Image (cartoon, grey):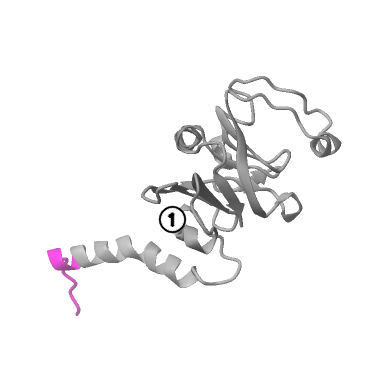
């Protein structure tokens, strides 16, 4: 007859296995195609891989890992923010642009293509229902904006009509760091 005894060592070992099992399972699937990345798997970026100089500052918005990377002009401040990204490839514009205007308390007017798809959309003044959140940084591409959102469920997802969205508290922080002229690359 076998007799199983519970010792402190067995309990601790069992607890360790239970704690680390999810990490081990994530590691097994991290490089498999079709496995979606999340906020814990941001890919670190180097500004030198995207820009010749930092200039006034630099932003890389990575639509694959759904992260925005920021470097200040001196290169001594690097930050990463979780984002929402365009809902489809057709809505995603990639390449180089820059911040040309900033607005605290932005209003929102739907674009012509949005009106075709969503005829009920209409102008929204600043406020809690505004899809641009509390702050907006307008890019040199018409109708493309880095902005906040009141709908926090959108962050980490493909949910925008082309813009890069951040939590309101994060766009407020980034807004204060980025002067007009900050260079931007969407990848």
Instruction: Let me know if residue 52 is in the magenta part.
Output: no
Q: Is residue 112 above or below residue 71?
A: above
19 sits to left or right of 75: left
- Residue 40 placement, left or right of 35: left
Q: Residue furthest left?
A: 8
Determine the residue positioned at 45% across, 60% down. Answer: 44
Q: Is residue 106 left or right of residue 169?
A: right
Callout 1: helix, strand or loop? helix
Closer to the camera in the image, 14 or 64: 64
Give percent across and percent down for residue 96.
Answer: 64, 53
Segment tinted magenta in the rendering: 1-10
Q: Residue furthest bottom?
A: 1
Residue 45 is at least partly visible in this image: no
Q: Quadrant of the N terminus?
A: bottom left
At which x and y percent is residue 30?
Answer: 49, 68
Residue 3 magenta: yes
Q: Quick check: 133 above or below 64? A: above
Q: Residue at x 55, y 29 (%)?
A: 135
Residue 18 x/y as whole percent: 32, 62
Where 167 falls versus 36 (above or below)?
above
Residue identifier under label 1:
40
Q: Position of residue 104 (x, y in %)?
A: 55, 25
């Amino acid at each position: 007859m076998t007799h199983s005894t519970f010792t402190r060592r067995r309990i601790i070992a069992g607890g360790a296995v239970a704690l680390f099992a999810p990490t081990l399972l994530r590691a097994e699937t991290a490089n498999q195609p079709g496995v979606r990345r999340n906020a814990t798997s941001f890919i670190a970026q180097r500004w030198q891989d995207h820009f010749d100089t930092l200039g006034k500052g630099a932003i890389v918005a990575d639509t694959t890992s759904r992260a925005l990377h920021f470097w200040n002009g001196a290169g001594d401040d690097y930050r990463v923010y979780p984002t929402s990204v365009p809902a489809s490839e057709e809505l995603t514009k990639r390449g180089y642009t820059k911040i040309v205007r900033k607005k605290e308390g932005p209003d929102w007017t739907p674009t012509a293509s949005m009106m075709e798809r969503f005829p009920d959309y209409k102008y929204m003044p600043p406020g809690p229902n505004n899809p641009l959140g509390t702050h907006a940084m307008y890019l040199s591409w018409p109708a493309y904006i880095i902005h906040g959102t009141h709908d926090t469920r959108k962050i980490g997802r493909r949910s925008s009509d082309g813009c890069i969205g951040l939590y309101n508290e994060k766009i407020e922080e980034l807004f204060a760091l980025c002067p007009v002229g900050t260079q931007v690359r969407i990848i």
